[in-house]
Image (spheres, grey):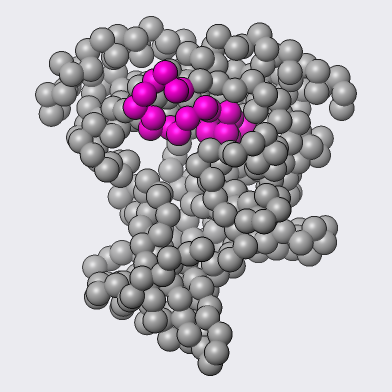
Amino acid sequence: MLKILPLLKNNQVDRALSHFCLLGEACHVNQYGNGNVNDTYLVSCRHKNESNLYTLQRINHFVFKDPRALMNNFERVTSHLLSKSIDQNHGNEVLTLIPALDGQSFYQDVEGDYWRMSKFIKEGKSFDVPEHDGHAFEAAQAFGQFQANLNDLGQPSLVETIPDFHNTRKRFDRFAELVKENPINRLSKVHTLVHSFLEYEYLADAINRSDFPSRVVHNDTKLNNVLLHKDTGKAICVVDLDTVMPGCALHDFGDLVRTAANSAEEDEPDLKKVGFLTSRFQSIVKGYLNGCQGMLSEREIKNLPIAPIVITYELALRFLTDFLDGDKYFKCHYEDHNLDRAKSQFALMQSMLASMSEMEDTVLAFQEMS
């Protein structure tokens, strides 16, 4: 059950709400979710005897430098997905934007912040880690179908809202720069860990985007970015579309494996609890290939096993880089949060490497079946 608190006494939130075409008057607002980038609020509006729920988000323009282009992407993607949903008659939900009073898909306030609203999907539930292999299968199939449905989006290309977002080489180079600069004197605390990270530099070049087809991909395929039906567990909607842009399908697959085939959450401080789950990987491969509907090339399929290892290393680099830089990018809930995240992801990567042969066998088996 959703816990709705009394209307937040926040003048900026109140002003933003007044600039959208809501059905009814906002009576309850609560901070919602555990996203690392945007600020998200759940809004309840009363209209006659009905309650309407919306999601209000303040777009982090420190991370997303061009919110207008981002929202243009958002509109194009959701419109295209809606047309596919109607054509395929599969009944899945698509995020629905609520227009601002001036007809735009967003509202920019006097402080320069950008806000958007969408309908809240009441039947949906998000999971940071799956409760069973079925959840992993459903999420994988949803992301595969998401890519397949956007494969014919056409021109013009979507704007890259964060250029080089999954450029692992660039992420490594930035990490190496911060190690040399040590801007806030945290290096002594992580000297041994940094040395371990440097030993795996070869992974920074294991997947080069230019070697694979350019596709419209989600780029942030954490398990909690697919809403599963709260009763049936079936996937009903892919959410968090800010990083949908041209990219490599392998990064989407790898990031889902990173979150859904992990025995713990991504910031687990007890590394003994962190491990790669091969049975979950099998469910993800099956679901993803089903969802892609034959879209992937032979080369893409062949490289599925290395993808989660690369993306896990990449995120570990990003967490440790942010720690060395003063926690500027990811939201942290305590002083060493980014450090715990980096250690946890590095441990997961090592567990994946130990299971590489099993991963290759799994992909080959499903490839032969298809």
Is 15 part of what is drawn in magenta?
no
- In the rendered image, the residue lying farthest to the right is 369
Residue shown at the point (12%, 24%) measured from the top left: 185
- Residue 215 placement (x, y as % from top left): 65, 39
Q: Nearer the viewer, residue 160 or 332?
A: 332
Q: Nearer the viewer, residue 307 or 353?
A: 353
Q: Is residue 154 above or below residue 191?
A: below
Is 266 part of what is drawn in magenta?
yes
Q: Nearer the viewer, residue 225 or 70?
A: 225
- Residue 103 placement (x, y as % from top left): 50, 79
- Residue 301 placement (x, y as % from top left): 72, 23
Residue shown at the point (54%, 67%) measured from the top left: 120
- Residue 244 placement (x, y as % from top left): 55, 47
Question: For residue 248, what is the image quadrant?
Answer: top right
Report the quarter where the C terminus lies. top right
- Report the number of discs: 0
The magenta stretch spans which residues?
A: 252-274
